[in-house]
Every structure is written in structure tokens, then in C-alpha cells.
Amino acid sequence: MTNPKRSLLAMVIVAALAIGVNIPSVMAQQSRDTVVFGMAQEPDCLIMTFCSMAAGMAVVNSVFADMVSYNDKWQLFPTTVMKVPTLKDGDWQLLPGGKMKVTYKFKKGFTWHDGKPVTALDASWTYLMLRNPRSPAVTRFVLRKIENMIVPNAADPYTLVVQWNETYPFANTGHTVYPRHVLEREYLRDPAGLKSHKQARNPVGSGPYKLVEWVPGSHITLEAYDKFPEGVAKIKKQVWRFILDATVLQANVIANQVDATEINNFSIDQMIEIERRNPGVTAHYTPAMIWEHIDVNVENEWLRDKRVRQALAHAINREELSTKLFYGKQPVAHTWLPERHEGFNPNVKKYAHDPGRARALLAEAGFTMGPDGVLRDSRGARFEITIMTTAGHAVREQIQQIIKEQLRAVGIDLRIDNRPASVLFGSITRLRQFPHLVMYAWLMSPTTLGNTFWHSTQVPTPANNWEGQNYPGFRHAETDKLIDQYMTEIDAAKRIALLRKQQEIWAEELPSIPLYFRLHLTTSNKKLTNVSPTGLSGTYINWNSRLWEWKQ
Amino acid sequence: MQRFLARRLVHGVIILIGLSILMFTLLVLTPGDPVELMAASNPDIRPEDVAMLRQYYGLDDAMYVRYFKWVRSVLKGDLGYSRTYGTPVTKLVVDRLRNTLTLLATSVAVAFTVGVTAGVYSALHQYSATDYVVTVAAFAGLAMPVFWQGIVFILLFAVWLPWFPAGGMMTPGVAPGWPMVLDRLWHLVLPVSVLATSGMASWTRYMRSSMLEVVRHDYVRTARAKGNPERVVINRHALRNALIPIITLIALSVPGILNGAVLTETVFSWPGMGLLLFQAVLGHDYNVAMAVLLFLALMTVIFNLLADLAYGLADPRIRYD
Amino acid sequence: MPGESAPRQLALRLERLRSEAAGYAVGQSYWQIARRRFLKHRLAMIGGTVCLLLTLMAVLAPWIAPHTFDRIDLNARWTQPGLTGNVFGTDELGRDVLTRIMYAGRISLVVGYVTAVSISIVGSLVGAVAGFYGGWVDSVLMRLVDMLIAIPLLPLYLILAALIPGGGVGRIVLIFTLFGWTTVARLVRGQILSLKSQDFVEAGRAMGASEARLILRHLIPNALAPVIVAATLTVGTAILSESGLSYLGLGIQPPIPSWGNMLQRAQEYLLKASWLAIFPGLFIFITVLSFNFLGDGLRDALDPRLKT
């Protein structure tokens, strides 16, 4: 009876010992020609215009070469084209009637991973394909501004002309390019079928790495593409592992089982813990363009009064949040644009933590203290407001707790009502269903101008078919005028002046309470050289991974 | 016998149809559909994009229309496409199924072997110190939150003592053949030990009480009285009879193990059906969620049927009506 | 309850044994015997005592908690457990962990108790209706039971949790009750069916007594025992299930503390402050263990035919 069990046990022990000794040594040898990335997300697909997961975008950074992209200094640089078009050089022209013409010259020598050349014909075809309402593109925001993309001279398939039907200040940031010869047949048969085309899971790319295998639920393996014209990647392989639990991912970083992480869901505390436990890892805290804030429903009878909104800002100790919760790493926000955005205005009205001032403003607005330490409005109603955010988001839930205590100190009773992200963003914000406050973040880019956030036409209502992201319901004539002006202002200096003016008004009116700017958190092994995350959405830690090397 | 079987089969089909309606309704009613999810993460999306995508994914049809469309394609053998993965559900599920079955089969085998052994030992040494320890340990195994145990194991055996990987199913790029087999086993150790815990505890308790019940029966006493060696009495007579009710329980424990698998796979990033289901439910990937849930139900129905049969074969006293 | 097969096993065993001892005398002496047996069951006594202590701790939390509940102190984050000040340490907001555990215990135990009661009520009603009316009513209800037993419940809880808004106790209890009543329903139905076929019912009927009255008179004491046992075990499983749902982010939502969501939050700080995970986990473990001991003891005591 006990014998089989004993021998089984012995077998297990022997096997465990054998493996325990073998595997780590195997891995150690391997890792020198491989970088293992860890992500807390698995991509949905790799034709990014049809997908929605950031994880896919990260892998795409290695697999596709862009026409133009941002580097770690947030400057545009060309990859598959000769140069970034500028007004000065004349390859970006303003035409009468507010139209524009932008010309790109593709470099010769870039090839798709099946050997076919990358040309302007691919770019113009991709434009046509995405433009077709039957292709499953998630958004056509920029596409709609473009009248056409043409290759004017059939003999020169390397010149692309983009004809814009409106003025747009960021018309030189390049376009998506997919391999026409791979996709066209399926496209002609059924554009809607493109999302399930094998290109979505096994793309023929143009970047420094090509996809070798995708094991669903586990990992994607990439291999250096030996015909990459700018130089073959120094490290032979990239493995992208999907480890969905941030704590498990953290353990993997500490145990050196992943060499770099991206989209890792780490908190600042977890990053610090990684640094403490594994001195061989660099924790990158990169300034990003992620703005954490609380939208105030300005159509509410209490919050309509800007003194009340200002009182809220004075009541919340944002300095303390920044220094205590984030060790000073994530700076307090005073306006809605991050410091590294061209339009950032450092001289807006700032609301320091000042409960006395908050109480005075509230008294001015007609609130009186009730017997239970909570304010009453002129009609005697208790000042009780609700804050909503994404359920399960630890940092936001902590901040709610802290804010609740601080608002209580000035006589406001804060209720907490959180929803899963899908519900919060799917209906609560989109259909403006939050009664008072909602806390979340906007992910911005250098091209974000906030027109959809603050223009009065962008308040989602049934009348405009819920278009826009002006969730606070902010309507301000002068702001509208400024936005209309800067949206089409090509001259950077003038645009910046308008943006700064807009922020001054914004900080006075305070349709949202700015909290802080989030950092982009990534890690990499110290032995990996040339790692330099950009902190921009769309550009991930591996944007320059072709140049990474293992230090000897 | 045949009548009984036919009736059970009809029941099984009714159960499956009922479940499919129930789950479809619940899934569709869940707020936030796939297009809303896409819209949420993308600041550039416009209402006309949303309208087009909704049409593209067929979300504007009435619920019953969508249900019948789904049923029609399932009957044709087409489980549809996964919205998130853009691959046919059949392929996706088959891949994941293999991983889950590896995990489940290993866990059940370990749990059953250890549990039955401990249960028998405990029963044969009733009221001994070992019996007491085994009983308390079995209770403890049932009271442990699965994910908590998983996290603690990762902490102990992957971080503090870096013996095992902290999640995942394989080392990418490991050489095929023996290194690969060993690599898989190495990755299996922690998740299996977590998933097997509650099973082990249950089997121990079932086996102990079943064994205790059997040894009091006449035929055991008779066997003993006939002068058979204790080993033979236990193995040939008691053990076999005590195992009969346990066979049924293997089938019935399947849903419970699958619950544990959802949590274990999440903790250990094990690319199996549990994890897939969890993500599909959260991501509103209806086709995937329906396929996995129905597959699980089908499995349970089949196992129940098998259990009924096995029970009858093993114990001739059971008659079917 | 969440895919547990133990109660089903119990049901099978009961069904088998019921026929052996059809005419078992129920009455005053039965409860006396049961009490005596229970008091002799050492593990059950320990379990029962711990359950009582935990419940007392939760009820009295506002009076006995060492610190003010949810008082945030950002200068005292991550205080390690120690004999002075914060016995179980402080969390990421500088809140006292022991105090939070006591308050969270109120929520977790309420989830357990209320689920147990509501499952018993719903299950008994459904079981009684099925057993009493028989025929197609019985068939429909039992197919429903088969259906719910045929799938792992956690995914269904997941779907329901995403479907039903809010984050309070009521929602969790509702979710658990909607799918958890099957075990009790089977037990009660089984009792009724066996009672219906027994001689004394036949006799009673012959003497003109109404069937319903007879069954109810005999049903209550007969079915009560297994229902009590199932309810006791439910308290533990409900607490476990809530923690599982919390781990997946769909259980009781903060700011309401439960052991489950404390544990979930603690996970992020596992490597930095493992005590945040260890203590709530330990409390779940001890609570579930105690209720299982108690339930097991009750089973042995209330159903002497199972006593070995």
C-alpha cells in the first residue's frame, strides 16, 4: 500500500532536484543573446489600428519601423523616411482655404520581413484601407482630416504626398504603414475580415525584430531581422512574457527571470521594493503625460459656483499626497498640461492646502455649518457629495480615503462609489452620469491640445450623440475662442501663447481639480545598455531596443 | 439500464440548453459592452466610430436574435471568433484546454493519491496521534484561501528560496525533448501543490469516513475471521469497497476543482481555461466565455453520467430504474 | 455552495442511511443526545469557542478596537507589527491593521452569517415545494439544481458581480444566494420524499390527517439537522468565496473593509510589508477552519447514525 506512494514521492523529489539544478543554469546561458520582457497584459492583436491593448503597441515598437516617431527627448526623428517634414524646409506647405500638403520621401532599403520593399505605395494603400468604413478601425480621428494620400509619380514609389483638408499643427508625425501585398487580397474579399487576418497575430513587419512565435497566454518570441537597413539588432532575441499579476511580475524581476518590464502595473512602492531587493535592476521613473485629476460636474447646483470648486482644491492636501504617497516622485499638478508639453504654463493660479481659506470660500458661497460638523446649503440640505473612480485601482482608492478625511475637516461629507473601469468609462463618464466628482487620468501626447476636453461643443449630450470628452460640462465662451484659435495655429510660439492663456482661465475656473502627474514606470537589468524609456504613450521602453546590448 | 441512460442523456441536454440561455443572458446584460471598452481607452474615438463598431460586432440586434445566431453557428460547429484575440474560439479553447488539463490531471492525481493514502492510514489508525494530525491537516487544507496559499508559496519558494518560477508555464525557448519536459514539470510544481491542497484534504476526509464505514461491515470481519492476512483484508476487501463511493466523487468534484483552477491560473499566470474565462468575462468576449462555460458544463454532465455508470458497475447492488 | 461536493456527499450518505433507520425516534431525547455528543466532540468545541470569540470581537469592535477605525496617518505608514503601539502593524495609509481586521471581521462574518441564513431559507422553500408537489414542479426545480451543480460557480459569481452594481454586503449575499441554495434544497426535498413514503404518513392519512400537516410536523425536526449543518459550513465557504471574488477585484469594495479585500490590497505590498497579507489571511483561515470544525461536530452530533 505504501510502497507505490513512496517510490512516487522519491521520483518527484529526484525530478525536482534535477530540474532545480538544471534549469537556472540553462537560462543563465541563454539570457546573453535574449532579452526577456515582462508585461502585465497580453496583446489582443498586432495590427494596432484594429486593437485596443497597449501591450500590443509595445511589441509593435520592436516589430514595425515607423515613418516618424518620438525619441527620449520627445523630439521627432525619421526612421523609414528621409526626414521629418517642416514648414521651413517647404516639404510641409500651407495651401489656400486652410488646406495643407505634406511630402515624405521614403528611404530605399527598408523591407518587409518577407523581403518585399517598404514603399510609399504601402502607405497610401494603408490610408485607403483604414479610410474604408468597413474596415474595423477603432478610430479615424486623424484620418478624417486627410483628403488623400497619393504617390504622385508612378516611377517614384518612394515619394508620398499627404493632402490635408484642414490645418493641423501635428501633420508631420507620420502615418501607419502596413504591407499591402500581404493584406490586399483579404481586404478586397472582405475588409471586415482583416481583424482576424493572420497578420493580426503573426504580422509581417518592417522593424528590427520579426515575430517568430506567439504562444497565447504565455509569450511572444521575436528574432532580430537580419536585413534591417539601419543595422541589425545587437541582441538576437526578444521574449515578451505575459505575467498578469503585478506581484508575480515583481517577484520575477527580483528573481532576475525577466530582464525588463513594460506595462507592468507597478506602484511606486513596488518599484522601490524592487530596487531594494535587487540592486542589479534599474527602476526607471520617467516623467510621462498622464494627468490624474478629479472632474467636477459643473452642472450640479452646488458645484456650479467656482468658489466651491476652489474650496475643494484648497481643502485637499495635494503636496502631502505627492510627498508621502509618492515620495515626491510624482509632482503635484496645477494645470491640465504636463510640464514637458510645449504649452505648459507654470504661472497659473495655484491652490495650496489651506482649510481656512476653503471654509471661508464655502461660507462666501452661502454654506453654514450644521450641528454634525457638515455644512448646510441655503435651503438646509446637507453638503454631501459623491466621488467615483475605477474600482480596484489601489492608488485612487487610497487617495479617496485621504480626500474623504480632508474634506470632512472643512465640513463636506464625501461618499465613495466606485465602478469597474469598463462601466466607469463605458457609461458613467461618457454619458455624464456622475453626480459630483469622478477621478481618473488622461493619457496625453505631445499632440494633445485638449480641444475635446474643454470646448463647449464637446460636452457629451444626447443632442450631439454623446460626442466629446468635456465630462465636467465646462462651458466658457473665451475658452472656446482660444481653443478654436490654437487648434489651427501652425506657428508654435503663437500656439503656445494661446495655450498658456487657456490654462490661466482654466485654473481660475477649475472645472477639474488637478491632482498630480503620473510617472511611466519601467525596469531593466543594469547589464542592459542604452535603455532609455521615453514616457510617451505609444512609445515604449523598447523603442530603441535595436541598440541595446548586454554588458560583458 | 438503457432507459436510465437515455433519460440521463435527455437531462444532460436540457441542462446544457438551460445553462446556455442563462449564461448568455447574464453575459449580455453585464454593463459595458466590448465597443464601450474600446471607446473608453481611446480619446480619439468618435460616436460614429462607436456606431460602426457596434454594427460590425452585431451588438445592435435584440438579445434573443443574438442568442439564436450563436446557437445556429454552434450547431454548425463554429464557435465564432474571439473578439479580443481575433482567432477562432475553437483553436483558442483547444490550446488552453491542453494546459488546463495538464494542471488539472496532475493536481487530481496528486490529490487523489495523497488523499486516499492519508485517509486509509488515518482510518486504520483511528484515534492515534497521526489520525488526529491528518484530520486537522485536512480541515486546514479546506480552510485555506487558494490564492492566498498561492501568493504565500510564491513568496516562500520563488522569492525567499528561489527554487521554482514565480508563475508561467514554460521557459520560452527551452530546447525540445527532455529539457522541455523537465521545464514543464518545474513550472508545474507550485501551481499543482496549491491546486491539489483542497482536493487532498477532501479525499482524505472522504476516504477516512468511507474506510471506517467499510471496516465495520460483515464481509470484512468475515474475511478477517477466515484468517486472511491483514494486508489482503485491507487491499482486497475493505479498500475496494471503500473506493466505490469515492469514484462518484471524482466526477462531482470537477466543478470545485475548476473554481480553484480559475484562481490558481490567475495567481500563477498559467495560460489555461480558467484564466481565459476570467479575462473573457471581464473583457466581454462573449464567444469565448460561452464556449468555455459550456465546455465546463458538458464535462461535468459527462462525468456525472460516467460516475453513475461506474458506480453501477462497481457495486452490483445498485440497480437502475 | 461554491462547487463543494462535500454536502452532496452528505446528501448521498443521508439518503442511503435514511432507509436503514426509517423509524428513527425524534423528540426531546434526540436533542439531548445530540447535545451530549457535541460536547464530547473536542474539535467542534474548540471550533465553536473560536467562532464565538471571533463573533464577539466583531460585534464589540467599536468598543475594544485599540485605535480609531480608519484614522489615516501618512507619517506612520508601514509600521512593523510589534508589542507596542500597533500589534499587527500599520498599512499603506498608516491605519492600524488590528483595528481594521476587527472592523473587517464584522463585514466578513455578516457575509457568512447572512448568506447561511438566506441560503437555508431559499433552499428549504425550494426543496419543500419540489418535494411536496412533485411532478413537473419537482422536475423543473431539480433540473435547475442539476444545472447549477454542473458548472463551477466562481465564473458565474464573476459574471453576476460584474452585472450587479454596488460593492456592499447585500450584493455579495444576493450573488451567493442566487446560486448557492441548491444543496439545502436537495436535502430538504430528500427528507420530504422519504417522509412521504413512510408508514406513519400512510397511517396518518388513513386516519384522515392532512398530508401537509403530517409532513410539516415531522419534517421540521428531521430536516432541521442537516440544514443546520449545511448552514454552518456555508458560513465558512461564503467567507472563502468572498475573499476569492475580492482577489479578482469583484468582492466587497473598499472603503468597506473585508478580510478578502484587505488581503487583495495587501498583495501589492507583499514583498514590502508581508504582515498586511499574513494577518487577514490568517483570520480567514482560522474562521473557516473553526466553522468547519463546528459544522462537522454538529453533523456527528445531530446525525448519530454517522457516528463512528
Image: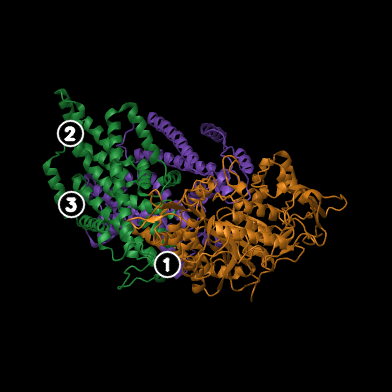
Chain colours: A orange, B purple, C green
Residue C217's tag is: 2
Image point (32%, 26%), residue name: C135
The quarter holding residue A345 reads: bottom right
Judge whether C269 appears above or below A41 on screen: below
Q: Say if residue A38 shows up in the picture.
A: yes
Q: Amino acid at mark 3?
A: Phe
Q: Is residue C287 left or right of residue B166?
A: left
A311 or B304: nearer the viewer = A311
B94 or C36: nearer the viewer = C36
Tag 3 secondary structure: helix
Judge whether A526 appears above or below A133 on screen: below
Tell me if label 3 and label 1 are in contact, CB under 8 Å: no
Q: Amino acid at mark 1?
A: Leu
Residues marked 2 and 3, same chain:
yes
Residues marked 3 and 1, same chain:
no
Q: Measure how far apart labels 3 and 1 are at the Cα level.
A: 39 Å
Judge whether A137 appears above or below A307 on screen: above
Q: Amino acid at mark 2?
A: Arg
Image point (68%, 47%), residue name: A140
Chain bearing tag 2 is: C
Chain bearing tag 3 is: C
Q: Quadrant of the C terminus of chain A?
A: bottom right
**Place of residue A236 in the rendered image (x, y in percent of width and height, measured from the top left):** 67, 65
Q: Which residue is mark 3?
A: C38
Chain bearing tag 1 is: B
**Place of residue B78 in the rendered image (x, y in percent of width and height, measured from the top left):** 58, 37
